[in-house]
């Protein structure tokens, strides 16, 4: 028996990539080992593994980035191999060496290849010698107007961290400092370099797979141009609209790059393709990529299985890769709000159901009931569609996302559907500025019918039973006016205790079944309010009131069928506390049920700076303290959450009267960070949305 045959594999990662690797291991009969932080103690990848080892702590720096702890975990679990996944330590040469020094099989490229590609500046020098096309570097110290625009990039990392676009020379010094500070914080290396920024460039990459027997496969192209914060959102294979000569040149350049560093295993060579069709080398990722499923679908391969095969010393199955077939598209479902500067979201993921069917695939690290926390990337899942043509694959993916049931934090699901159906995407007019141009349209209120969805929510609640309805009303009413009195008509209303019996009368308003009843909802996340009136006649089936053209066909607590202007429509209704989720055939809606009475304690003092999300305070503006003067729009506090950094800006010019934030503090959403007392002489400005700086 070969000494490097893998029997037990530890995955030095978490979430969907760990789950995806475990899936292949199960198919191959390999025992799986998970590592987990305290925040991930009940995560899906832990539940799916055969064995699991705790890494004490929650922050990545204390857990998944501790190579010594991961190697110790592999030894403790009796693993004979380690797969790094992507992110964390996947491109860390010292970690790869430590794994091998411990006598374990490293399921990744040679340490030397990782080292050579670890620095983008050194990698570019090496690629120049291999004949790979490059953008000429620019020395920031001598940059002039003709060099603009410039792109600043961290030499030691990716994912958009430390990256800046500079369009004015006056801004270059400050942007260099900011980029270097962010790069040092994210990667422990503040080296930053500059190169020309290619307007409307496309991000095109080539998947390579190499063995130790001198075989290197170029597995087609992928287009990853649709990005936000320089991070990919939608990817597809093959990259559309490239002529055969350009495809051949990209394949040859990728193979040359792999051979130049003696590569083995799975890797990706990334290029920027200009509007004129000129390719320029960006970097080589010495690991598996998030978007690898689209290549797997088109080539009919399991790239993780091939990684394991190569790590065991076996050759690739043939000198040439298999022939591709069809087209595949992947969409990354994130817990984030695109309309609010892509703010990451946290909380309980109550439901995650994506339609199954031919050509569809779901890769995820979550199931319904899991919690999306603050410590890690906000990606919930990847949904992949494969079909004979691009048009069919895009249509299949858009419809699957549209029909998915995703309840909990705000997600980018609607943005994904609209992106896939946008005319520019349909026509393959792709470049990295897609969201810069189209975000406002893609996040504008849709053409759906939230009022009818709110009606469906009301009717479903009406038939849940009098006790359930009255109990919910009692809780919401009591929460709204606890500690206060509300006067309605001629009577003073005092709330019941939460969970207690609801009174038959609320002031001068009587809950008489024969009279119209009213419910109020707030749409999430846009805040639009809807009021729905209905009656419950002697038949017991609630009917809409003041809603012409709508007829109730069937009503149950979780499903409502209505005829709206002659068209039958179905609504699935799910309630979690005061949140109601309504899924229709063409859209999904989330409502918050509102109490009858407004809460007098919902007002925030003017000038309050509140945390827009849970996270960690990473730094304060220099000299920031109570009593100092600040200018409107001035960055005061930097907050990091889910791998992204956000600036909290002064809402007005004035005096900082209170400061509750300090570096290292963990804060919850809505936490009071500081208070700025506005200078009456200053020109008032709107309160800005916190800016994401990654």
Image (cartoon, grey):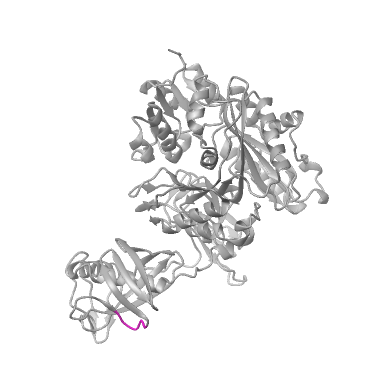
Task: Examine the structure image and report whether residue 547 is included in the region drawn in magenta.
Answer: yes
The answer to which quarter of the image holds residue 158 is top right
The answer to which quarter of the image holds residue 630 is bottom right
From the viewer's perspective, is residue 312 above or below residue 590? above
Q: Position of residue 288 (x, y in %)?
A: 54, 34
608 or 283: nearer the eye? Answer: 283
Task: Examine the structure image and report whether residue 36 is included in the region drawn in magenta.
Answer: no
Q: Which residues fall within the magenta stretch? A: 544-548
In percent of the image, x 51 and y 19: which residue is there?
100
Q: Position of residue 503 (x, y in %)?
A: 18, 75
From the viewer's perspective, is residue 33 above or below residue 442? above
In percent of the image, x 41 and y 37: which residue is there?
19
Instruction: Farthest residue to the bottom: give it.
Output: 490
Give the main secondary structure, helix, strand or loop, of the magenta stretch: loop
For this view, does 290 lie left or right of residue 507? right
In percent of the image, x 48 and y 26: which residue is there?
308
In percent of the image, x 39 and y 26: which residue is there?
30
Marker count (numbered): 0
327 or 384: nearer the eye? Answer: 327
Residue 482 in view here? no
Q: Position of residue 321 (x, y in %)?
A: 59, 31
Residue 505 in view here? yes
From the viewer's perspective, is residue 588 above or below residue 113? below
Q: Position of residue 373 (x, y in %)?
A: 41, 47
From the viewer's perspective, is residue 518 above or below residue 571? below
Quarter of the picture containing the N terminus is top left
520 or 334: nearer the eye? Answer: 334
């Amino acid at each position: 028996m070969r000494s490097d045959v893998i029997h037990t594999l530890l995955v030095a990662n978490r979430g969907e990539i760990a789950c995806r690797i475990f899936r292949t291991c199960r198919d191959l009969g390999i025992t799986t080992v998970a590592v987990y932080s305290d925040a991930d103690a009940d995560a899906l990848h832990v539940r799916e593994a055969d064995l699991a080892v705790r890494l004490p702590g929650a922050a990545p720096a204390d857990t998944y980035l501790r190579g010594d702890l991961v190697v110790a975990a592999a030894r403790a679990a009796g693993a004979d191999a380690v797969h790094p996944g992507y992110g964390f330590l996947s491109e860390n040469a010292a970690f790869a060496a430590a794994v091998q020094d411990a006598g374990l099989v490293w399921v990744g490229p040679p340490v030397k290849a990782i080292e050579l590609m670890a620095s983008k500046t050194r990698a570019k020098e090496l690629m120049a010698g291999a004949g790979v096309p490059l953008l000429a570097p620019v020395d920031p110290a001598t940059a002039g107007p003709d060099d603009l625009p410039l792109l600043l990039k961290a030499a030691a990392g990716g994912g958009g961290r430390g990256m800046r676009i500079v369009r004015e020379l006056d801004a270059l010094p400050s942007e260099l400092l900011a980029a270097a500070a962010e790069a040092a914080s994210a990667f422990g290396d503040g080296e930053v370099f500059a190169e020309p920024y290619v307007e409307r460039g496309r991000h095109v990459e080539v998947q390579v797979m190499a063995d130790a027997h001198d075989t290197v496969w170029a597995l087609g192209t992928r287009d990853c141009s649709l990005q936000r914060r320089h991070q990919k959102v939608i990817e597809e294979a093959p990259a559309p609209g490239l002529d055969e000569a350009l495809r051949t040149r990209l394949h040859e350049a990728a193979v040359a790059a792999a051979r130049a560093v003696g590569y083995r295993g799975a890797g990706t060579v990334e290029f920027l393709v200009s509007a004129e069709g000129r390719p320029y080398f960006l970097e080589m990722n010495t690991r598996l990529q998030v978007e690898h499923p689209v290549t797997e679908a088109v080539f009919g391969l399991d790239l993780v299985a091939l990684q394991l095969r190569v790590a065991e010393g076996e050759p690739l199955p043939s000198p040439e890769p298999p022939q591709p077939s069809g087209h595949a598209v992947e969409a990354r479902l994130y817990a984030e709000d695109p309309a609010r500067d892509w703010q990451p979201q946290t909380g309980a993921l109550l439901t995650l159901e994506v339609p199954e069917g031919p050509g569809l695939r779901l890769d995820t690290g979550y199931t319904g009931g899991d919690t999306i926390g603050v410590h890690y990337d906000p990606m919930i899942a990847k949904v992949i569609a494969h079909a004979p043509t691009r048009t069919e694959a895009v249509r299949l993916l858009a419809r699957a996302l549209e029909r998915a049931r995703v309840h909990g934090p705000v997600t980018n699901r609607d943005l994904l559907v609209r992106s896939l159906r946008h005319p520019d995407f349909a026509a393959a007019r792709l470049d990295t500025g897609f969201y810069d141009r189209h975000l406002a349209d893609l996040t504008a209120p849709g053409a759906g019918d939230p009022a009818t969805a709110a009606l469906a929510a009301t009717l479903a609640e009406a038939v849940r039973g009098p006790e359930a309805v009255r109990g919910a009303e009692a809780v919401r009413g009591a929460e709204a006016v606890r500690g206060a009195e509300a006067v309605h008509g001629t009577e003073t209303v005092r709330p019941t205790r939460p969970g207690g019996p609801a009174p038959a009368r609320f002031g001068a308003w009587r809950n008489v079944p024969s009279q119209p009843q009213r419910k109020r909802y707030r749409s999430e996340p846009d805040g639009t309010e809807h009021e729905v009136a209905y009656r419950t006649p002697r038949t017991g089936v609630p009917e809409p009131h003041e809603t012409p053209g709508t007829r109730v066909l069937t009503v149950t607590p979780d499903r409502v069928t209505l005829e709206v202007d002659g068209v039958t429509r179905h609504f699935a209704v799910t309630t979690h506390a005061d949140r109601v989720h309504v899924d229709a055939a063409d859209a999904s809606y989330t409502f918050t049920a509102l109490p009858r009475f407004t809460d007098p304690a919902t007002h925030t003092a003017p000038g309050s700076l509140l945390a827009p999300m849970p996270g960690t305070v990473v730094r304060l503006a220099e000299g920031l303290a109570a009593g100092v003067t600040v200018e409107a729009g001035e960055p005061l506090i930097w907050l990091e959450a889910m791998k992204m950094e956000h600036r909290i800006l002064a809402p007005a010019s004035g005096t900082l009267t209170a400061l509750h934030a300090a570096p290292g503090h963990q804060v919850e959403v809505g936490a009071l960070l500081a208070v700025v007392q506005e200078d009456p002489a200053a020109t008032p400005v709107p309160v800005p949305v916190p800016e994401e700086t990654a």
